[in-house]
Image (cartoon, rainbow, N blue to C red):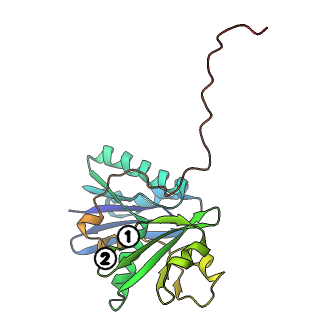
Amino acid sequence: MRTLVIETATAACSVALIDADGVVAHRHEVVGRGHAERLIAMVAELPDGGRASRILVDCGPGSFTGIRVGIAAARGLALGWGAALSGYTSLTLLAAAAFGRDPACSELAVVLEGGHGEVFMQQFAAPLRAIAPFTSLRPEAALEILSPDLALFGSGVRFITAIDPQRRVHDVLPDAADAVLLPPQDAGLPPVPIYGRAPDAKPAAPRLPMTGAPA
């Protein structure tokens, strides 16, 4: 059974076809805010136009716009193809990739850019187990929590090194192809956004009906 993986939670846009044997094909580009323009075209470049019986999409946390674009595309394709749809988190995907590339690593933290100078952060232990809930906080607050020798992975590490240049960091973005490393329990989330913090824009309060004429 093939799975189409959609990854749009950060500045990277990537898609992959995976099956029980591994990665069939994938595309990965750093697009900044251009997910809406590139995503469907990248899916179409995959074998059979990316068609799969299952779709797996990154639900966040990360870019509000990127997350919405990815989930909307995944829902549309799943409806059109009659495919099963589920989600995963960007934090877990990066942790799985890091542990997969370094079997000697026993513990790490994933740090993603969170907006407004904050970072999304979560700590993991090998083989792949979250040892703290993910949180959004200022980099200086993150440093108070993290042990000095802990390896850090993700797009938000530059905020950490700006304060502590000696930290051991890996500036990496999520890649859809790494979804082959996710165990089933981490790839079965509901396909709904995980934003990590409240949106910047808030809906206007509804106007109350006038109850009388002005004096």
Q: Amino acid at mark 2?
A: Leu
Whole-percent x, y for residue 106 in the image: 35, 87
Above or below, 115 relative to 159: above
Image quarter where the N terminus lies is bottom left
Q: Seen in the image, is 201 located left or right of residue 133?
A: right
Q: Residues within 10 Å of mark 1 (few under 14, many from 20)?
A: many
Between 58 and 92, the residue placed more toward the observer is 92
Image quarter where the C terminus lies is top right
One can see residue 11 in this view: no
Q: Residue at x 61, y 50 (%)?
A: 200
Q: Secondary structure at mark 2?
A: loop
Whole-percent x, y for residue 34 in the image: 58, 58
Q: Are marks 2 and 1 in contact (CB under 8 Å)?
A: yes
Between 71 and 114, the residue placed more toward the observer is 114
Between 178 and 116, the residue placed more toward the observer is 116
Residue of label 2:
128
Residue of label 1:
92
